[in-house]
Image: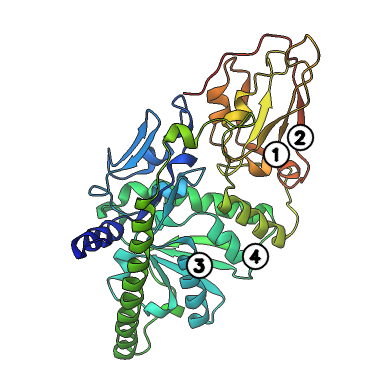
């Protein structure tokens, strides 16, 4: 049994980690040749996120808990804990009901601390960099037409480097909503809307204070549960990275991109798209030079979501002659690992996505020549 000191250490460790690292999903962990460093680029603290040599790590003492890295990670290898997606969605839903004004308001912790709005009427995040597109798309699919992001003076904020991420998400979300014919819009502002005004300052803050203690009590309970689970995990024999990611049946373990699928579900509720092609960071379109490709299949082997897969059988005496590739746009997260793993550099991932292909349940078949000898192993 762990001692009291062990439990305290575990609780403190969990409380100081705002991000859950799922390293096996990181493309740079799966393949050391992966070029993706979006989390590093989005982080406000240089050196806080470390990626390379099959390692993904965060210096949590330096981390500011802004959540921007979790927003830009294409494979969801970094997932937010403060708050978690489900908790944030619950907060927004409660705030919408409290307002009764058909709008959703999400505010950063800095402007929330000024106490200029009723805390019951908005959801709070450490930084608006924590908000990604699946939340506003989901809100729009439930009839919310105004999604307002309220933040303070970013120029003096420790999260100010996350402004680029925030603006990119606002543009991306509005573009998707416009394409799918929704009247909903995401707006970023520095002031709370009238629906969030304080009606009775003392009453509001009294309720907010009581809510704080209820939340703190529940948080302590959740932390204790997490600590117990963590302790049990420590007792298990953890396989090595190589064992976890070894190739089986011609491919590595694959994962579903939950946020992307949630977005597609929300867009489906909104209706049919009005444009044939969209520019997006969320999904990708793979194109292969069939004459150059030798059907080695490394792109499919390393694909983290299964967007690319090998189909067909080898013909007698002609290696890879009967091999083709299938591509599912809905499962592509534009991580670029397939292009990085391609020996012949005959594969490109485009951010120009055909909406018909994105919504097609049938994958696109890509024929390749396959006459050249297959490439050597590439499992580093």
Q: Secondary structure at mark 4?
A: helix
**First in sequence: mark 2 or mark 4?**
4
Frontmost of labels 2 and 4 is: 2
Question: How far separated are the C-alphas under marks 3 and 2?
Answer: 34 Å
Q: Secondary structure at mark 2?
A: strand
Q: Is residue 27 visible?
A: no
**First in sequence: mark 4 or mark 1?**
4
Residue 345 lies in quadrant: top right
Question: How far separated are the C-alphas under marks 2 and 4?
Answer: 28 Å
Frontmost of labels 3 and 4 is: 3
Q: Is residue 320 visible?
A: yes
Given residues 283 and 128, the one toward you in this image is 283
Q: Is 301 placed above or below 355 here?
A: above
Question: How far separated are the C-alphas under marks 4 and 1?
Answer: 24 Å
- Point out which mark residue 35 bears: none
Question: How far separated are the C-alphas under marks 1 and 2?
Answer: 6 Å
**First in sequence: mark 3 or mark 1?**
3
Question: How far separated are the C-alphas under marks 3 and 4?
Answer: 13 Å
**First in sequence: mark 1 or mark 2?**
1
Q: Position of residue 288 (x, y in %)?
A: 68, 23
Q: Secondary structure at mark 1?
A: loop
- Point out which mark residue 89 bears: 3
Q: Are marks 1 and 2 in contact (CB under 8 Å)?
A: yes
Q: Position of residue 37 (x, y in %)?
A: 42, 34
Colour logic: rainbow
The residue labelled by disc 2 is 364
The residue labelled by disc 4 is 141
Q: Image point 34% across, 71% down: which residue?
A: 219
**First in sequence: mark 3 or mark 2?**
3
Q: Are marks 3 and 2 in contact (CB under 8 Å)?
A: no
Q: Image point 80% across, 15% down: which residue?
A: 315
- Point out which mark residue 328 bears: 1
């Amino acid at each position: 049994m762990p001692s009291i000191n062990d439990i305290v250490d575990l609780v403190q460790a969990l409380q100081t980690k705002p991000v859950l690292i799922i390293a096996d999903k990181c493309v740079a962990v799966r393949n050391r040749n992966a070029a993706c460093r979006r989390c590093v680029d989005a982080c406000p603290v240089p050196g806080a996120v470390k990626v390379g040599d099959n390692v993904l790590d965060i210096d949590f003492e330096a981390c500011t808990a802004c959540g921007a890295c979790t927003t830009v990670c294409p494979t969801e290898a970094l997932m937010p804990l403060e708050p978690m997606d489900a908790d944030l969605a619950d907060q927004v839903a409660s705030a919408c009901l409290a307002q009764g004004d058909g709008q959703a308001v999400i505010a950063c912790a800095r402007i929330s601390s000024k106490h200029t709005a009723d805390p019951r009427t908005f959801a709070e995040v450490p930084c608006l960099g924590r908000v990604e597109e699946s939340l506003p798309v989901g809100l729009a699919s439930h009839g919310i037409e105004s999604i307002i992001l309220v933040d303070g003076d970013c120029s003096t904020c420790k999260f100010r480097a996350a402004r680029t991420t925030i603006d990119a998400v606002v543009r991306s979300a509005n573009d998707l909503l416009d394409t799918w014919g929704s009247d909903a819009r995401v707006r970023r502002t520095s002031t709370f809307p009238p629906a969030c005004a304080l009606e009775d300052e003392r009453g509001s803050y009294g309720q907010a204070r009581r809510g704080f203690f209820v939340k703190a009590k529940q948080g302590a309970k959740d932390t204790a549960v997490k600590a117990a689970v963590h302790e049990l995990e420590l007792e298990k024999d953890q396989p090595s990275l190589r064992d976890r990611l070894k190739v089986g049946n011609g491919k590595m373990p694959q994962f579903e991109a939950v946020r992307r699928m949630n977005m597609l579900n929300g867009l489906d509720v909104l209706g049919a798209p009005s444009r044939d092609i969209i520019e997006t960071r969320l999904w990708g379109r793979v194109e292969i030079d069939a004459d150059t490709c030798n059907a080695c299949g490394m792109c499919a082997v390393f694909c983290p979501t299964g967007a690319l897969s090998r189909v067909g059988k080898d013909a007698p005496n002609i290696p890879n002659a009967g091999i083709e590739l299938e591509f599912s746009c809905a499962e592509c997260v534009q991580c670029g690992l397939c292009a990085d793993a391609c020996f012949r550099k005959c594969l490109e991932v485009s951010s120009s996505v055909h909406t018909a292909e994105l919504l097609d349940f049938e994958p696109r078949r890509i024929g390749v020549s396959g006459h050249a000898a297959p490439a050597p192993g590439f499992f580093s």
